[in-house]
Image (tube, grey):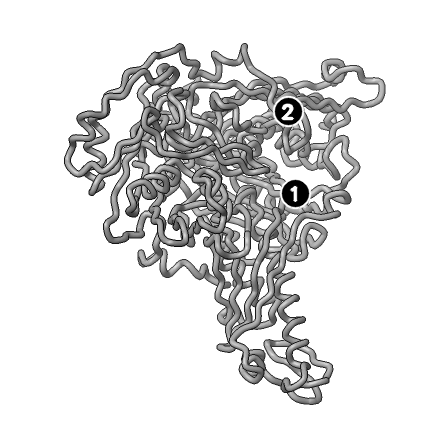
Amino acid sequence: MPSRLDGPVKATGRAKYGVDHNFPDMAYGYLVLSTIAHGEIASMDLSAVRAAPGVLGVYSPFDPLELATPTLPAFGDTWVPLQDKEVAYYGQPIGFVVAETFEQARDAAMLVEVTYHERAALTSLEEGLATAEDAPASDHGGGPSLDILADGVESIEDALAASPVVVAETYSTSPQNHAPMEPHSAVARWGSGGLTIHSGSQGSDMQAAELSMALRLDPSQVHAVNPFVGGAFGGKGRTSAPAFLAAAAAKELGRPVKASLTREQVFTATAGRAATVQEVSLGAEPDGTLTAVRHDSWCSTGADRSFVEPTSHGTSREWYATPNLSLRQKMVPLNLPPTTFMRAPGEAPGSFALESAIDELAVKLGMDPIELRLRNNSVAPPGKDLQWSSKYLDDCFRIGAQRFGWDQRTPTGRTDGDWLVGVGTATAMFPALRFPASVRVTLGADGRAEVATSGADPGTGLLTVLSLVGAETLDIAPEQVTPRLGDSSLPPGGMSGGSTATASAGSAVMVAASAVLDSLLELAAEPGAPFEGAEVTYADGQLFADGRSMPFDELLRAVGRDSLSATGSSAPGEELTKHSFSSFGAQFCEVRVHRWTREARVSRLLGVFDAGRIINEKAARSQLSGGMIWGVSAALHEGMEVEPNGRIANGDFAGYLLPVHADIPDVDVHFVEHPDTLHNPVGARGVGEIGAVGMAAAVANAIHNATGIRVRHIPITIEDLLGD
């Protein structure tokens, strides 16, 4: 089982992340953040800052760095700091101080005196529900509203009223921060060719594109380098404030500039996951057949309305077969840090509501929760003719139930001394997507092959996948392949996000490898070549013709070539008009709740997943178990707490709870492996995000099984379980 190629350098500290780069004459930048949630900056007294030791430059909306707003077709505008005096949230970047040392920049930044024209701020999702706005069109299924009704049914209300059994409840989820190990940072350096930026990003070519637009440069003048990214989860999909500011300041000062957010600043000067409120109504026949599903959802969003958490459209739109379906997605603009993609955006919080409601329906029907889910298994998203390309969710539940010992479950849990023990389950689904990607494959006269793309590996294992897929397609050993990524000068690999990287880059690797082998065969048969005029074949890294064989590197040397390259590109195509695509999974959880203290402890976790072909089982297992741990964290630990003035009360790792080793038992992951070549030629679907889907609901369902207490919000606390 192959190990990660980047494991040794990361484990030994030899991997250089963005902020690890140092250059002669380097200066240091420190961000200044707002201390109100809404208003306008009236003035900034910077006299003491400019007089502070070591200060080289001070920038503010009154003396801004020259930057424009970049726009990418699929993502819209990216916010650039210091371009106006408006304050939309507490902790917004409003200033930048550059000094000879980090300590001097930090200390000088503390001397900034800001006067505001403060305005009323809305910082509570619950208080803003009455003024909610329709969300914009969703990638998951069109506009903010969707109604699919059976013939003769006039409304979803009529369908629910006609249903013999109905569950209708409200669920809520807390806002979260990505909390990457590597804070957002950048080291910017200018030279004769333009800007070189070292900054953790989920797509170096996209970061280079945004910076070239912001700095009004030709794209060829920006070189983004980020071979190592210390965690991203969606939070490094756009260019960060430190990168914009360091790049512009380095140009103005004529020397390299390093800027990094502090851990506390990461909680506000970036974007996070939205808070949600969701109303789910399920109508069913006595045998559990769903007759109606209504899922109305509200999510917080920043004042710029730049992102919507598609909870209803990301789950109820596709998960279960039903003749009547109604979805409503609304957003509530708040004076809080903006929201953005975060591991399983939409599906993670949406599944908590939907899968909790399904469990409540199972209890009301007196039916096994797995049986209820399988009875309503969809062959296609409701209202669509495009069936799933491949779906083995029933096998996931069947195998999972056997491995987990589900047949020992009782409707009211069991006791073990002073512990109340319960089990829960939930469905997991995440769309199988792929983005356009290009990869260059090079055969070298040294007997090695290089597989290169600009895409990023923010811990997902893409570097190793490039090696494995490249080796397989070139029919050589993985040890002969050198993968490269995280460099905008390489062919554009797009963003590593949406669980797309393996399918996207892997498909492009296959195209490029086939092209370079075709060129190799032509080269071998050219006049003067070792196989001149012969019909040449290739296998196992060697060329064959006329009873002779020759390794590809020997051939290249024989014709005087150091290397031979080809670039291949791949993008979604006509398959999108023929099938629906998703990865599937069944989540299982055992929870122990102490009878007297009401402490909840997760004691067993199992996830069984159908994600097509698994390229690297070790890495896939790690990705899925990490997602499952994230789900436990959402259920029992994680949530930003906002004070009325908009300040994040727990914006650090002391107050923002994350699980540690003692909170998580051994995590069991099992694959139901059926390659899905209808989706892409590699046959693989994404695993990076689906592990986080459904797990929070499985935990909450297990707690209900153990205690009889139904908690409809996360995170679940001891106070929620005190009962009577």
- Residue 587 seen anywhere in this rendered image of the structure: yes
Give x and y (percent) for residue 20: 31, 51
Residue 361, label in figure: 2
Residue type (three-letter) at the residue carrying disc 2: Leu
Q: Nearer the viewer, mark 2 or mark 1?
A: 1
The foreground one among 114 and 306 is 114
Q: Residue furthest bottom?
A: 547
Above or below: residue 645 compared with residue 449: above
Where residue 37 appears, x then y in whole percent?
37, 18
Image point (55%, 63%), residue name:
468
Q: Secondary structure at mark 1?
A: strand
Residue beneath disc 1 = 582
C-alpha gap between disc 2 and disc 1: 25 Å
Q: Residues within 10 Å of mark 2 (few under 14, many from 20)?
A: many
Answer with left or right where residue 330 lies relative to residue 534: left
The answer to whether mark 2 and mark 1 are in CB contact below 8 A is no
* Residue reaching furthest to the front: 192
Earlier-in-chain disc, 2 versus 1: 2
